[in-house]
Amino acid sequence: MNKVTYFYLKSCPYCKKADDFIEQLLQENPEFKNIEITKIEETENPAIADQYDYYYVPCFFFEGKEKVLEGDLTKNDVEMMFKKALEH
């Protein structure tokens, strides 16, 4: 299974938007349900967050620590990331 790690903050409006995009895309594309998404709230898990190299949330990594998206994004950005995750 393809894995994506997603760092976010509860108070971040860009993260809320990313959450909405994720939910929409999972409903619209059943194949995306084959992607294991691990959501990590940055302030609740600082030890884990410190192991990754990023500056802004939302931030997505593929298996391991390959950063694929960071900061403000569009639904198309998330969709392309999911498609790439399926190929990973």
Image (cartoon, grey):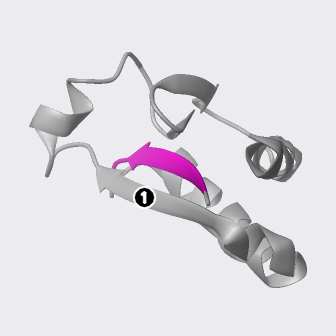
Q: Which residue is mark 1?
A: 38
Task: Quadrant for residue 33, please give it.
Answer: bottom right
Q: Which element is circle 1 on?
A: strand
Is residue 46 left or right of 49 when viewed as pictured? Answer: left
Task: Quadrant for residue 71, please give it.
Answer: top right
Q: Residue at x 52, y 38 (%)?
A: 63
Q: Please check the rendered image and state whether residue 45 is part of the magenta-colored stretch, yes or no.
A: no
Q: Residue at x 52, y 60 (%)?
A: 37
Is residue 14 left or right of 55 when viewed as pictured? Answer: right
User: What range is drawn magenta here?
Assistant: 2-9
Q: Amino acid at mark 1?
A: Thr
Q: Which quadrant: the N terminus?
A: bottom right
Up/down of 7 relative to 17, above or below? above
Along the line of sight, which residue is nearer the eye, 58 or 37? 37
Along the line of sight, which residue is nearer the eye, 55 or 66? 66
Is residue 52 left or right of 69 when viewed as pictured? Answer: left
Q: Residue at x 19, y 37 (%)?
A: 48
Find residue 61 and report its horizontal and vertical position in percent: 53, 35
Q: Residue at x 84, y 52 (%)?
A: 79
Up/down of 58 relative to 79, above or below? above
Along the line of sight, which residue is nearer the eye, 36 or 44? 36
Find residue 88 and report its horizontal and vertical position in percent: 74, 40
Find residue 69 and report its horizontal and vertical position in percent: 64, 31
Find residue 66 and report its horizontal and vertical position in percent: 55, 23
